[in-house]
Amino acid sequence: MSQSLGHVTVAAPVLLALVRAALRETPGVVRLAHAPSVQGETPVFAGSGAAIAIGATGVHVTCAIVVARGARLAQVAATAQAAVATALRELAGVDVAAVDVSIADVAAIEKTRDHG
């Protein structure tokens, strides 16, 4: 017999952090772009690369990314959509209404120097 122990609430900034982490881990994403705008939905929580709106049907996510030059743009966008939706559903247990991805630019992959 399953008994409810109460409610669990995940704060919007935590959801936004999950979205941004999922985007950064997506192959082909060089970096996050400017904070996108979400039209017609409230409340909106935004940060670099992502904005979320929490509505009656679930979370609506809008993402803005910079994709690696030469990458298949549609494939990177679809992978990013799936990664964001999966992170929110599996890690936070929230319903995802939509994940919109905007490719703001293409750029060379940024390399870091090993100063070791």
Image (cartoon, rainbow, N blue to C red):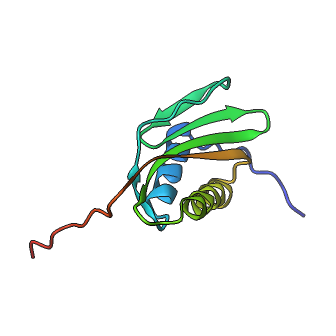
Judge from the rendering whether residue 6 lies leftward or rightward of residue 10; answer left or right: right
Quadrant, the N terminus: bottom right
Horizontal side, residue 30 vs residue 52: left or right: left
**What is the residue that sits farthest to the bottom in this orientation?**
116
Asked which quadrant contains residue 68, the reply is bottom left
Q: Quadrant of the C terminus?
A: bottom left
91 or 1: nearer the eye?
91
Q: Where is residue 23 in the image (x, y as percent from the top left)?
A: 49, 56
**View extreme (left): residue:** 115
Q: Is residue 50 above or below residue 2?
A: above
Drawn side of residue 15 relative to residue 34, left or right: right
Please give the name of the residue rendered at 65% of the width and 55% of the height, measured from the top-left corner: 85
Which residue corresponds to the image point at 75% horizontal and 50% vertical from the top-left? Answer: 5
Q: How many labels does the image show?
A: 0
Q: Dividing the picture into quarters, in which one does residue 37 lie? A: top right
Residue 105 image offset from top left, x and y in percent = 42, 48
Residue that appears at 21% across and 66% down: 112
Residue 97, located in which quarter of the rendered image?
A: top right
Residue 19 shown left or right of residue 113 in the figure: right
Image coordinates for residue 76, horizontal then vertical, percent? 55, 62
Q: Which residue is located at x 86 percent, y 60 percent?
A: 2
Viewer-nearest residue: 61 or 66: 66
- Residue extending farthest right: 1
